[in-house]
Image (spheres, grey):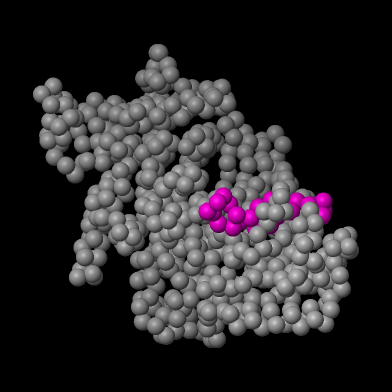
């Protein structure tokens, strides 16, 4: 059987997710032996842009050029896999998408200008995404597992549980319940092994929302712990400002205000 | 019932002796401000006997969070994983509720179709119980788990100057005989002190769960709006299932290797609180709402398990209450179902 043709692309972002692949030192030789790596500009001088079996795309769509690259890759790729929270959720760059774009541009670039900026969006805002690996950056373990699953002819399994699940298994103190910290663990997709809470730092939500995250319940818990509405929305939306989740929080905020009035 | 008395000052020596028999696992504090957790004992001084509850129960030693089942490869077919199954272990300092919970797991994993992994670990592990002092979350007495008469090798009840030791098996008796210089015979005064201690403990429970007719009441309240409203509070984090000593659901997954030729299959803890849990092929979900999933968990403990096995599926350890980030309390939900409180 021919080796699968792979392309790895980065749109607007820090390339951290591509670096995670390069950091798999122990497995790199096995990976390049198993796939036909066509395009990976982070690591390769002469990419070949052709039909692909699988494309991995990191970064958010934040400029017209990103959109062109993405549409082109989508047309050429059998499977398109979003890697990293920017590609999956829009990421930190999209945290201010609720604000006026022109004003933001003026604030950042002044008279120099930067005309080609779009509100940063996840890949799924433009194309069909076949599988998502969230994380800022992605987890090495999940990346290797996903690659191996694809080599076996399977789509990888999605993670349907939040950070809390792994945090309980690690027998950590609950930073939300027992320390009253603003921890995004209950709302955030697991798979990191509760990396931050295991070091006594609340989850920052870098992996984006877990399926059916109960945003309203967490919002209410945090209000009751004394956090202000703006801070909660900002912290819960740092890595994934998902409009309908923000709406849920605002709705819950109004309900809560009525309850105490 | 065979008994013995262990001198208080000899406890450390006894534990050191147990380490010669096998890997010694006991409650210890995780860090300065951490929870108590069962973990391997390096220094007997670190063992904590007056803990209230560990975060994870004993199931982690018999049904590990991630459990390798077998390896597969095109060249060699299937090979059952056997790592650690033959390891001789002693779990020291187990409370009655956790011993009782293990009996529930035995019914499931050693019943009709014995699970070879669970069975091997169970076979090679000795259990030493210890008496406890209930806190405001404990309700084991309501579900018959405050006292066990079987399912342990030794059970220690703390008295003033030492431990009243009940011997529950011949393996337990061997542990005493091997270090018999640390023990003396039980006196009438010890028995009287044991009974006083038992009575005082029994009277100290502050939380009660009324279980009479509970399966019938739950059937009647299957469609109650309580489930939807409690489901709105539930964060769906599955934490209650992880910390529950009688939750045993797992999912099975393959982790393939990069060679495209081989891999492993393992099982890992799962929870009926997760939306994925009740999805079947074709995408249908039997329990799409969080409230339905919360109901499933409580139904299984208090209706389905008792109807099938004739005993409560809950041992009243209080962990799900202690560790729920949303503050849900199963005893409160059941009182609500019974119509005793209006929320």
Picture mark count: 0
Residue farthest to the top, as pictured: A46
Is residue B34 within the magenta segment?
Answer: yes
Q: Is residue B205 left or right of residue B102?
A: left
What residue is drawn where x is 41% and y is 39%?
Answer: A135
Picture coordinates of residue A33, whole percent (x, y) = 55, 22
Q: Is residue A43 above or below residue A228?
A: above
What residue is drawn where x is 44% and y is 76%?
Answer: B332
Q: Is residue B167 visible?
A: no
Residue B328, picture quadrant: bottom left
Picture coordinates of residue A85, whole percent (x, y) = 36, 39
Identify the magenta region.
B17-40
Q: Nearer the viewer, residue B239 or A36?
A: B239
Q: Nearer the viewer, residue A212 or A49?
A: A212
Residue B83, picture quadrant: top right
Q: Is residue A143 left or right of residue A78?
A: right
Picture coordinates of residue B293, whole percent (x, y) = 44, 66
Q: Quadrant of the N terminus of chain B?
A: bottom right
Picture coordinates of residue B153, whole percent (x, y) = 78, 66
Q: Is residue B95 left or right of residue B176?
A: left
Q: Nearer the viewer, residue A115 or A130?
A: A115
What residue is drawn where x is 55% and y is 57%?
Answer: B35
Is residue B246 within the magenta segment?
Answer: no
What residue is drawn where x is 26% and y is 39%?
Answer: A94
Q: Is residue B14 visible?
A: yes
Q: Is residue A131 above or below residue A170?
A: above
Residue farthest to the left, as pictured: A111
Q: Quadrant of the C terminus of chain B?
A: bottom left
Q: Is residue B131 above or below residue A151?
A: below
């Amino acid at each position: 059987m021919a080796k699968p043709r792979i392309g790895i692309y980065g749109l607007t972002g820090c390339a951290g997710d591509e670096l995670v692949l390069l950091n798999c030192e122990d497995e790199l030789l096995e990976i390049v032996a198993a796939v036909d790596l066509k395009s990976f500009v982070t690591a390769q001088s002469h990419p070949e842009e052709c039909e692909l079996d699988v494309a991995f795309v990191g970064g958010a769509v934040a400029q017209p050029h990103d959109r062109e690259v993405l549409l082109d890759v989508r047309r050429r790729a059998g499977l398109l896999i979003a890697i990293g929270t920017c590609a999956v959720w829009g990421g930190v760059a999209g945290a201010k998408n609720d604000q006026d774009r022109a004003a933001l541009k003026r604030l950042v670039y002044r008279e120099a200008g930067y005309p080609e900026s779009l509100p940063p969006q996840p890949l799924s805002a433009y194309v069909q995404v076949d599988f998502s690996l969230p994380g800022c950056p992605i987890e090495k373990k999940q990346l290797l597992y996903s690659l191996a699953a694809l080599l076996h002819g399977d789509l990888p399994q999605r993670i349907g549980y939040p950070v809390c699940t792994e945090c309980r298994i690690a027998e950590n103190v609950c930073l939300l319940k027992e320390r009253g910290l603003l921890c995004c663990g209950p709302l955030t997709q697991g798979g990191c092994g509760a990396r931050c809470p295991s070091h006594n730092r609340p989850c920052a939500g870098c992996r984006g929302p877990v399926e059916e995250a109960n945003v309203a319940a967490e919002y209410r818990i945090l209000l009751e712990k004394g956090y202000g509405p703006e801070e909660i929305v900002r912290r819960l939306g740092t890595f994934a400002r998902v409009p309908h989740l923000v709406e849920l929080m605002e709705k819950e905020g109004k309900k809560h205000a009525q309850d105490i009035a | 019932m065979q008994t013995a008395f262990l001198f208080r000052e000899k406890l450390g020596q006894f534990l050191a002796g147990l380490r010669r028999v096998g890997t010694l696992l006991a409650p210890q504090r995780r860090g300065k401000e951490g929870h108590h957790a069962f973990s391997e004992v390096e220094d007997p001084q670190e063992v904590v006997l007056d803990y209230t509850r560990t975060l994870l129960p004993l199931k982690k030693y018999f049904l590990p969070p991630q459990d390798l089942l077998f390896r597969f490869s095109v060249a060699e077919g299937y090979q059952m994983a056997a790592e650690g199954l033959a390891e001789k272990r002693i779990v020291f300092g187990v409370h009655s509720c956790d011993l009782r919970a293990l009996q529930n797991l035995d019914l499931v994993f050693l019943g009709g179709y014995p699970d070879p992994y669970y069975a091997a670990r169970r076979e090679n592990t000795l259990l030493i119980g210890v008496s406890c002092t209930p806190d405001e979350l404990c309700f084991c007495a309501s579900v018959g788990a405050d006292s066990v008469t079987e399912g342990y090798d030794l059970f220690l009840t703390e008295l003033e100057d030492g431990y009243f030791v009940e011997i529950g098996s011949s393996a337990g008796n061997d542990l005493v005989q091997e270090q018999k210089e640390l023990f003396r015979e039980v006196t009438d005064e010890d028995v009287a002190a044991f009974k006083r201690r038992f009575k005082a403990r029994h009277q100290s429970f502050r939380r009660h769960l009324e279980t009479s007719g509970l399966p019938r009441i739950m059937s009647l309240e299957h469609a109650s709006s309580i489930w939807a409203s409690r489901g709105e509070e539930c964060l769906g984090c599955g934490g209650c299932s992880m910390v529950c000593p009688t939750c045993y659901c797992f999912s099975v997954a393959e982790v393939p290797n990069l060679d495209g030729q081989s891999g492993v299959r393992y099982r890992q803890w799962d929870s009926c609180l997760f939306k994925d849990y009740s999805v079947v092929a074709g995408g249908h979900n039997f329990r799409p709402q969080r409230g339905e999933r919360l109901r499933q968990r409580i139904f299984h403990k208090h209706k389905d398990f008792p109807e099938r096995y004739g005993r409560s599926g809950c041992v009243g350890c209080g962990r799900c209450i202690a560790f729920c980030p949303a503050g849900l309390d199963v005893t409160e939900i059941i009182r609500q179902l019974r119509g005793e409180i209006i929320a």
